[in-house]
Image: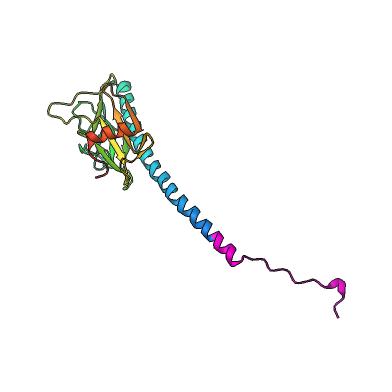
Amino acid sequence: MTPTHLYKPPARMAGFTLLELMITVTVAAILLGIGVPAFSDIIRNNRLTAGSNDLLHSTQRARSEAVKRQTTVAVCATANAEEEQPSCSNGAFSQWVVFVDSDGDWMIDDEEEVLERHGALPASVTVRNDNGGIVSYAANGFPTPPPAGGVSPTRNVVICDSRGNQQIGTNSTARAMLIEGTGRTRVSRNFDEVTAAIGQTGDCPR
């Protein structure tokens, strides 16, 4: 017979009841249903913010380089920013380059320096802009007039995704980069300003 002082009762097995398990799964499903769409919107908003801020930075750099170098510097849309000798596409700012436009012809010539290249934005991001997909700055920091027979400079750029121009309070889900007559650029989420920019660029997305 086992001595009394050596006897240990069997350990109590811990676990979940079926009801507890069902409650846990239900709560997890609710939290997942709430959290996944919110997280998805955060990712999409970050992509739009990053794209618009990158283009804003490029226009600001072009302007400051024009003043510093005392020559014309431009930002233009391109079909392939990584080409050794990229060319301006006169299209949407899905990719772009900043270059020294020494002769002011709004084209990238062989001897002109490319200062910055920006590759393609994510496939989920759509860009619309008015006119010729180029912003050019003179040595005084003001926009340059187009060369004879040249395209008109861009003044409105809209960056959006599949949500389009949805209104949330006073803001839009899209972004607009606005280029003023003085050459100053800024990014806006204001619904009215984005809507006005879309009126110049076309619906976003199409």
Horizontal placement of 54 versus 196: left or right? right
Judging depth in this view, the residue of 142 and 97 nearest the camera is 142
Question: Residue 174, located in which quarter of the rendered image?
Answer: top left
Question: Residue 195, located in which quarter of the rendered image?
Answer: top left
Judging depth in this view, the residue of 116 and 143 nearest the camera is 143
Instruction: Inspect this view and state whether residue 115 appears.
Output: no
Position of residue 125 relative to residue 110, above or below, is: below
In the image, the segment drawn in magenta is 1-24
Locate the N terminus by quadrant.
Answer: bottom right
Horizontal placement of 51 versus 89: left or right? right
Furthest residue in direction front, as rendered: 19
Instruction: Inspect this view and state whether residue 203 appears.
Output: yes
Position of residue 101 relative to residue 119, above or below, is: above
Residue 52: image location, x then y, percent:
34, 36
Position of residue 81 relative to residue 142, above or below, is: below
Judging depth in this view, the residue of 112 and 185 nearest the camera is 185
Locate the C terminus by quadrant.
Answer: top left
Residue visible at 12% across and 29% down? 149
Horizontal placement of 14 versus 183: left or right? right
Tell me, yes or no, whether the highlighted magenta stretch contains residue 82.
Answer: no
Query: How many numbered discs, if any?
Result: 0
Furthest residue in direction bottom, as rendered: 1
Residue visible at 16% across and 31% down? 151
Furthest residue in direction left, as rendered: 149
Residue 59: image location, x then y, percent:
31, 30
Question: Residue 176, located in which quarter of the rendered image?
Answer: top left
